[in-house]
Image (cartoon, grey):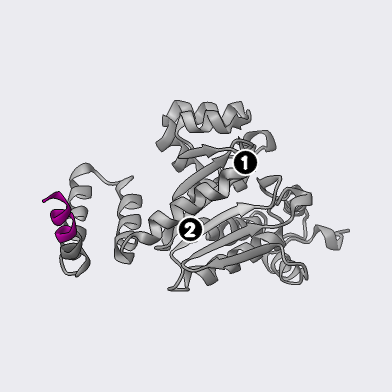
Amino acid sequence: MTRMSDIFTYEDILAEAMAEPRELVTVLRQGARATVTMAEPERMNALTAALMWQLHQRLQELAADPSVRVVVLTGADPAFSAGGDLALIERGARAVHQPEHEQGTLEPWRWIRRQFGGVARLIAGTDKAFIAAINGAAAGVGLAIAMTCDILVASDRAVLVPAFGKLGLVPEVGTSWQLTRRLGYQGAFAFFVGGRHVTAAEALELGLVQEVHPHDQLMAAVDRWCEQIVALPPYTLEMTKPLLRAAADMPWAQSLTMEEFAEANCFSTQTLPRAAAAIKARRS
């Protein structure tokens, strides 16, 4: 006999997530910047159904807000995110083996695609800059979401945990794409099958994060990135982010052509001639 706890449909899990009364994701707005914090520290910000749904909702709201130019994503200490909720994973795996569960793996697929994949696509596809402030452990899908961001700044307490293989999972939510471009095939393969914890210093050496700072200086370092980004003309960020993301999969000649079209548009702004005149004046 199937228990209610064995039922796993996308609609059921979503309804449970939406019924959560606690605020598990907070948003702090400061001018053109918004800081989004996954806030269930007693569970190391594990991506439960409720936290994941709230995260997706908050990011959708910020993506639609024209006043926001930079989104900082972090976790409440001591972790960035411990990754997928193990209870939810166990529940999904148990449910698909029930004879009454006619959809089989389609229900977990819907959650993986619409929630985990939905957040990753939003981060990559919006013209806002996303900065991951990795303040502690970033594991599994939590690591995948951090790596989708445009800039990764880490605390010296940060640790990257590729937990996929040990759980019996394949690389997920875009990490196979991210890591093969950073580490090459063999480096990415070793990262996954080794499954060992990578310290912040090692992550910097491998090019997995852009900066490492003492823990109490992490957000000050993120502030500096935010200031640099906000100081750019808005169209520069809006055009550069999709250009660079697309270039990763383009042949050189196609990338060059895309840059040429994009750069010509910059000449239609007043920003470019003013900036050129100011630099010329300083040099003379």
Check disc 2 and report the residue beneath it: 123
Tell me residue 218's x, y (percent): 57, 45
| Image quadrant where residue 27 sits | bottom right
Instruction: State whether residue 144 is above or below residue 269.
Output: above
- Hey, what amino acid is under mark 1? His
The residue lying toward the viewer, choosing from 20 and 207, is 207
Instruction: State whether residue 212 is above or below residue 60.
Output: above
Q: Is residue 43 left or right of residue 36?
A: right
Tell me residue 275's x, y (percent): 20, 60
**What residue occupies the far left of the structure in this picture?**
284
Q: Say which residue appears at 45% left-offset and 26% top-offset.
A: 186
The answer to whether residue 102 of the structure is visible from this angle is no
Is 4 magenta? The answer is: no
Check disc 1 and report the residue beneath it: 215
| Image quadrant where residue 207 sits | top left
Q: Say which residue appears at 47% left-offset and 37% top-offset.
A: 179
The residue lying toward the viewer, choosing from 192 and 242, is 242
Stretch in magenta: 276-284
| Image quadrant where residue 95 sits | bottom right
